[in-house]
Image: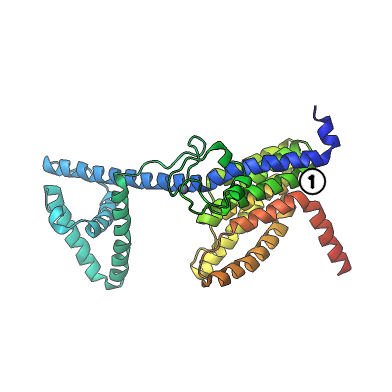
């Protein structure tokens, strides 16, 4: 059945390209909705932790009211003193004095205040920490009442974020619909982000390139999965500077599994590639942090390079790091210059790693022979 396709590679490449356009329009949805869901999840966890903490305080109050002393360890006492300091920051004093337990809080607070006065060096820092905590608390309670779940990735249909206009089936044709509508919403006429046609076009071209390079087979199929995941996480990193574990970790596991089937690099190369990929950026991160006290990169970058190592092998790690760092330095400084921002602005590194890894996955052998040729000439 597949024989005619193999004999007409141009047709196979074209079909892969069209398939890529369709996958690209799904990736657009992932890029927009996955971070929104992650952030919603974090807000929910934040509220749950807060509720647990408040429940434990109420439990203590009940004990004190019944005249019983709760059994406590020194560690629990220390934790309580720390919590009281943060409670002080967000609750007015008159509200605190409402119950017997709260009166005890007041005494503990006085002790904390006395110990802080005894150590004036800590004072400023302590207050800064309190000041930082209270806005988080305000944000948590503000979202508590009305924070509906953002739309799911697969279930809900696409709509205009401005006017809520539900897209008709013919508005969902990759690239063409955007061109036909001249980049404007059919309902309200507001501009549709250039991200949509760009991601679709990029996915289409990348899918075509994978089939063009590998032909039809398991390697190409694995390559399409690799490509799709890389485009999704690059888009998310570019928009939000987040690299979700829910994408980087599956990419790592799928890469290791693909190598056991002989679709990509030998298993040993994949395993060492993953380990060295992770540890190399991990050590750069900690060296930078110990020297400067700052986070030089996101921890998602380690996981992404580990995944790229699993797909491209141990030998790919150095070229991928060199290519992505050069790309990042050039494009990043151009971007900062264009936006007029200083060098403290965080630049997502994920898209550069992903691009370098993808190029290596397709053209690693060519890159190595060019490199070896240069070495021999030198
Ligand atoms: Zn609209």
Looking at the image, residue 252 sits to the left or right of residue 43; the answer is right
Instruction: Tell me where residue 58 appears, x and y as whole percent.
Output: 20, 43
Q: Residue at x 30, y 45 (%)?
A: 144
Looking at the image, residue 121 sits to the left or right of residue 157; the answer is left
Q: Residue at x 67, y 37 (%)?
A: 257
Tell me the quarter of the image containing the C terminus: bottom right
Q: Quadrant of residue 29?
A: top right
The residue wearing badge 1 is: 213
Looking at the image, residue 194 sits to the left or right of residue 63; the answer is right
Q: Nearer the viewer, residue 25 or 292?
A: 25
Q: Residue at x 16, y 41 (%)?
A: 62
Q: Residue at x 57, y 49 (%)?
A: 181
Looking at the image, residue 340 sits to the left or right of residue 375; the answer is left
> What secondary structure is found at the residue carrying circle 1?
helix
Instruction: Tell me where residue 231 appears, x and y as whole percent.
Output: 62, 49
Q: Is residue 97 above or below residue 378?
A: above
Q: Is residue 341 above or below residue 93?
A: below
Q: Nearer the viewer, residue 365 or 111?
A: 365
Tell me the quarter of the image containing the N terminus: top right
Q: Nearer the viewer, residue 291 or 217?
A: 217
Number of other residues with Cα within 10 Å of mark 1, as a class: few under 14, some 14 to 19, many 20 or more: some
> Is residue 303 visible from the viewing direction of this image?
no
The residue at label 1 has a CB less than 8 Å from ligand 1: no
Instruction: Tell me where residue 55 appears, x and y as whole percent.
Output: 24, 42
> Is residue 320 visible from the viewing direction of this image?
yes
Q: Quadrant of residue 150?
A: top left
Tally of marks = 1
Q: Is residue 132 above or below residue 358?
A: below
| Furthest-top residue in this view | 1
């Amino acid at each position: 059945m597949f024989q005619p396709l193999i004999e007409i590679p141009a047709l196979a490449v074209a079909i892969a390209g069209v398939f890529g356009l369709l996958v690209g329009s799904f990736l657009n949805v992932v890029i927009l909705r996955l971070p929104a869901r992650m952030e919603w999840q974090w807000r929910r966890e934040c509220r749950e932790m807060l509720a647990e903490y408040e429940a434990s305080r109420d439990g203590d109050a009940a004990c004190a009211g019944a005249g019983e002393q709760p059994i406590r360890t020194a560690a629990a006492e220390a934790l309580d003193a720390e919590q009281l300091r943060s409670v002080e920051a967000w609750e007015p004093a008159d509200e605190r004095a409402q119950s017997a337990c709260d009166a005890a809080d007041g005494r503990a607070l006085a002790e904390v205040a006395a110990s802080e006065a005894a150590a004036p060096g800590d004072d400023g820092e302590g207050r800064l920490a309190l000041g930082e905590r209270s806005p988080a608390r305000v944000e948590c309670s503000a979202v508590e009442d009305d924070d509906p779940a953002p739309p799911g990735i697969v279930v809900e249909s696409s709509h205009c974020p401005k006017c809520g206009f539900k897209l008709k089936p013919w508005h969902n044709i990759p690239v063409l619909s955007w061109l036909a509508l001249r980049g404007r919403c059919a309902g309200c006429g507001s501009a549709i982000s250039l991200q949509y046609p760009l991601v679709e076009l990029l996915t289409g071209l990348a899918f075509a390139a994978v089939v063009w390079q590998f032909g039809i087979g398991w390697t190409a199929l694995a390559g399409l999965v690799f490509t799709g995941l890389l485009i999704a996480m690059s888009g998310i990193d570019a928009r939000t500077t987040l690299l979700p574990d829910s994408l980087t970790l599956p990419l790592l596991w799928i890469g290791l599994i693909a190598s056991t089937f002989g679709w990509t690099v030998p298993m040993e190369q994949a395993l060492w590639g993953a380990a060295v990929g992770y540890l190399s950026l991990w050590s750069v991160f900690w060296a930078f942090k110990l020297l400067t006290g700052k986070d030089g990169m996101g921890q998602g970058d380690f996981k992404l390079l580990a995944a790229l190592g699993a797909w491209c092998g141990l030998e790919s790690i150095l070229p991928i790091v060199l290519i992505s760092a050069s790309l990042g330095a050039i494009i990043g400084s151009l971007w900062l210059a264009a936006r007029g921002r200083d060098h403290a602005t965080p630049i997502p590194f994920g898209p550069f790693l992903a691009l370098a890894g993808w190029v290596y996955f397709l053209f690693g052998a060519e890159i190595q022979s060019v490199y070896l040729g240069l070495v021999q000439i030198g």
